[in-house]
Image: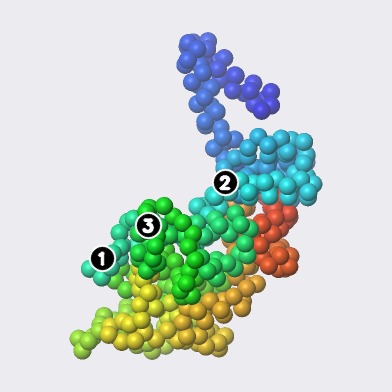
């Protein structure tokens, strides 16, 4: 706090005090404080000499605030404020020291509950209401457990400083009794979550998580399109073309007998207006078809053996979740680039623009020697020019 800050609030108190009692005058000062843009917004003030449209380096306290909201989702603590005040954040060593300290703090759990939940769109899980006749085992408690499983996996990667690709390959997960029973994992009792080793290779990583599989389904069936689109956008950072207007809906099961989702989709894809987009999304979605609309494993649908094979857009054949995961890991720089883009967006509070992409690519290159450890990606972001600078708005 500066003297000007205090004097400004004191003026409200003194003006009110001329006609009211002490309590009313203090209340007026508090109202002024709560209405101040400096309280409501996280402002980063440009130096007076900076002209509109020019870039400038953040001062120590603004950089501390940006760092704290990035890693903790809240304001800086006393130690970070003290470091900023004595100029420690102006040195690479001082900035790295504070970033590592903050990553090790329990408040870094905000990266899982805020960043990962936004990036992976876990909030969409609340909008899905699986049909109780088809999925009688699903309820709100199971949905909440699915979401928590994904948050805990991401939190473990942060705390243990693991390779970010472990999101796709982790041979462990976090379950309570309710979720373990849904997955068929034995010897887990009680509501508390615990880490368990996965003996089923199909269940590894977030593609085996009920959260992802349920929110990319619809009420009464799976959706290879939604699942393929989710993987393209959130894991590979690729946006499929928008669907053409007047796309015909998926036809219901014929009166001659139920069909598998793949059979119904093949008929839908025969429409030339639909084939282009589906070529990108469907092979990925079909590879996940062994998971039903709530993430339970299955081998048959509509009385027929499931066919999870397909050919990716680059011509690579896959035959299910395991080979899909292997192919995505083969594109690890692309996956890490997507993670970096989303982290940088979250850290800056704005979208990543075309002129930020050289920085994104350099972060990915610099993180490769460490096997893409999470802390390396974070530190490269913190050291980057977009993170440490801002631009004064133009006229």
User: Can you say whether 285 is above or below 106 in the image?
Assistant: below
Which residue is farthest front?
187
User: Can you say whether 347 is above or below 248 in the image?
Assistant: above
Q: Crowding at label 3, few (<14), some or many (≥20) Cα neighbours within 10 Å?
A: some
Question: Sequence order check: which comes first, mark 1 or mark 3?
Answer: 1
Residue 19 versus residue 173: which sits nearer the camera?
173
Q: Secondary structure at mark 2?
A: helix
Q: Crowding at label 2, few (<14), some or many (≥20) Cα neighbours within 10 Å?
A: few
In which image quadrant can residue 237 be found?
bottom right
Location of the N terminus (image quadrant): top right
Q: Which residue is mark 3?
A: 189
Whether residues under marks 2 and 3 lie with C-beta atoms below 8 angstroms apart, the answer is no
Q: Residue at x 28, y 68 (%)?
A: 135
Left or right for 78, reference 119: right
Q: Which residue is mark 2?
A: 106
Left or right for 341, reference 389: left
Residue 99 versus residue 334: which sits nearer the camera?
99
Tell me residue 139's x, y (percent).
Answer: 30, 59
Q: Secondary structure at mark 3?
A: loop
Tell me residue 290's x, y (percent).
Answer: 39, 78
Tell me residue 53's x, y (percent).
Answer: 71, 51
Q: Residue at x 68, y 37 (%)?
A: 79
Q: Residue at x 58, y 59 (%)?
A: 157
Numbered disc total:
3
Residue 273 versus residue 296: which sits nearer the camera?
296
Question: Sequence order check: which comes first, mark 1 or mark 2?
Answer: 2
Q: Residue at x 62, y 67 (%)?
A: 336
Question: Sequence order check: which comes first, mark 2 or mark 3?
Answer: 2
Which one is closest to the eye, mark 1 or mark 3? 3
């Amino acid at each position: 706090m500066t003297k000007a800050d205090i004097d400004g609030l004191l003026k409200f108190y003194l003006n009110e005090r001329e006609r009211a009692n002490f309590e009313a005058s203090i209340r007026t000062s508090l109202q002024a404080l709560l209405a101040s843009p400096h309280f409501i917004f996280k402002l980063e003030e440009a130096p007076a000499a900076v002209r509109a449209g020019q870039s400038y380096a953040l001062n120590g306290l603004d950089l501390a605030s940006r760092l704290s909201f990035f890693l903790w989702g809240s304001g800086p603590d006393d130690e970070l404020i003290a470091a900023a005040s004595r100029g420690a954040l102006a040195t690479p060593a001082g900035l790295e020291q504070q970033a590592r300290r903050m990553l090790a703090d329990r408040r870094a759990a905000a990266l899982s509950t805020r960043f990962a939940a936004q990036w992976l769109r876990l909030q969409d899980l609340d909008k899905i209401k699986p049909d109780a006749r088809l999925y009688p085992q699903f309820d709100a408690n199971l949905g909440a457990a699915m979401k928590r499983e994904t948050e805990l996996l991401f939190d473990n990667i942060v705390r243990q400083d693991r390779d970010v690709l472990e999101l796709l390959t982790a041979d462990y997960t976090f379950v309570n009794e309710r979720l373990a029973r849904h997955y068929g994992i034995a010897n887990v009792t009680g509501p508390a979550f615990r880490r368990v080793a996965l003996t089923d290779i199909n269940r590894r990583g977030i593609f085996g998580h009920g959260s992802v599989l349920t929110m990319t389904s619809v009420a009464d069936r799976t959706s290879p399109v939604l699942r393929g689109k989710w993987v393209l956008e959130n894991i590979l950072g690729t946006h499929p073309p928008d669907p053409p207007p007047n796309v015909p809906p998926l036809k219901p099961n014929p009166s001659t007998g139920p069909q598998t989702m793949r059979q119904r989709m093949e008929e839908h894809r025969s429409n030339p207006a639909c084939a282009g987009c589906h070529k990108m999304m469907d092979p990925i979605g079909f590879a996940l078809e062994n998971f039903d609309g709530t993430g339970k494993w299955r081998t048959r649908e509509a009385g027929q053996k499931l066919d999870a094979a397909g050919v990716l857009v680059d011509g690579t054949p896959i035959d299910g979740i395991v080979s899909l995961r292997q192919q995505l890991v083969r594109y690890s720089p692309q996956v890490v680039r997507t993670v970096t883009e989303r982290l940088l967006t979250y850290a800056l509070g704005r979208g990543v623009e075309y002129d930020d992409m050289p920085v994104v690519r350099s972060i990915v290159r610099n993180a490769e020697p460490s096997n893409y450890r999470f802390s390396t990606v974070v530190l490269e972001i913190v050291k980057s020019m977009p993170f440490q600078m801002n631009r004064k708005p133009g006229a």
